[in-house]
Amino acid sequence: MDIILLGPPGAGKGTQAERLVADRGMVQLSTGDMLRAAVKAGTEVGLKAKAVMDAGELVSDEIVSAIIGERLDQIDHATGVIFDGYPRTRAQAESLDTLLGDRGRKLDYVIELEVDEDALVERITGRFTCAVCGAGYHDKFKLPKVPGTCDVCGSHEFKRRPDDNAETVRTRMVEYRAKTAPILPIYEARGLVRRVDGMADIDHVTQAIEAILDGKA
């Protein structure tokens, strides 16, 4: 089962991908991670990518597709794949069809985690973590049991990510919509798109995705 998992930053896409990897033995292919791995490994494609990045330029669709093809060749045919961050353009979507077809694979679903922008802003801007152990909290949904004291390690130091602010979140949403707009119609026309409420409880989102993959939704 090969799928594309879509969702803006903060929608919980990473968490759901981790669960699919753990529960179904799928492999998550994140273009950013694969680029870094290929560069580090010094593969032929990785060296090309490094040269482009060192020059301060964007890595071409051709290089990104080559890296994905290289990684697909290492994955057993019976193992499902989650595409994360790819494709982002019509050209990449066409390349993905070719990459999969050449390897006797096909795309089964494109699953989008839908979010309410205002609720997403509230979800992200309220996040903070223990500066010592990394335990996660939220201003509204999960405060420490004892104010100012970490439930896990007892530390009194907390921190927030500087980019967890409303302006940044809304900018990310604009970027996300701009990136998905070109590819969604392609997959809609093929009946592959399924949508899940990304604002629901994490376990409910997992169950909804499982139902899609099991052909029950």
Image (tube, rainbow, N blue to C red):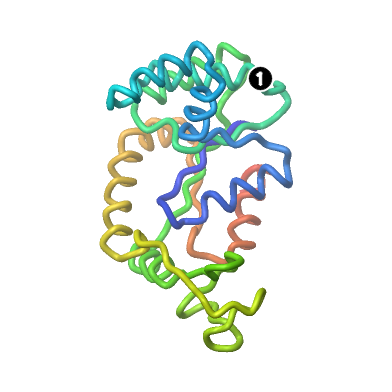
Residue in view at x 66 percent, y 19 percent: 74
When asked about the image quadrant of residue 207, the answer is bottom right
Q: Residues within 10 Å of mark 1 (few under 14, many from 20)?
A: few
Residue appearing at x 45%, y 69% in the figure:
159
Rendered residue at 53%/15% (across/down): 43
Residue named by callout 1 = 74
Residue 25 located left or right of residue 13: right
Q: Nearer the viewer, residue 80 or 125?
A: 125
Q: Amino acid at mark 1?
A: Gln
> With respect to residue 108, does 9 lie above or below?
below
Residue 178 is left or right of residue 157, and the answer is: left
**Residue 149, image x and y in percent?**
57, 83
Q: Is residue 206 above or below residue 158?
A: above
Q: Position of residue 174 (x, y in %)?
A: 27, 50
Q: At which x and y percent is residue 137?
A: 53, 73
Of 212 and 183, nearer the camera is 183
Vertical placement of 204 versus 112: above or below? below
* Residue at figure coordinates x 54%, y 80% from the top left: 156
Quarter placement of the N terminus:
top right
**Along the line of sight, the residue nearer the viewer: 141 or 33:** 33
Q: Helix, strand or loop at disc 1?
A: loop
- Which residue reaches farthest bottom? 146
Q: Position of residue 196 (x, y in %)?
A: 51, 54
Count of marks placed on residues: 1
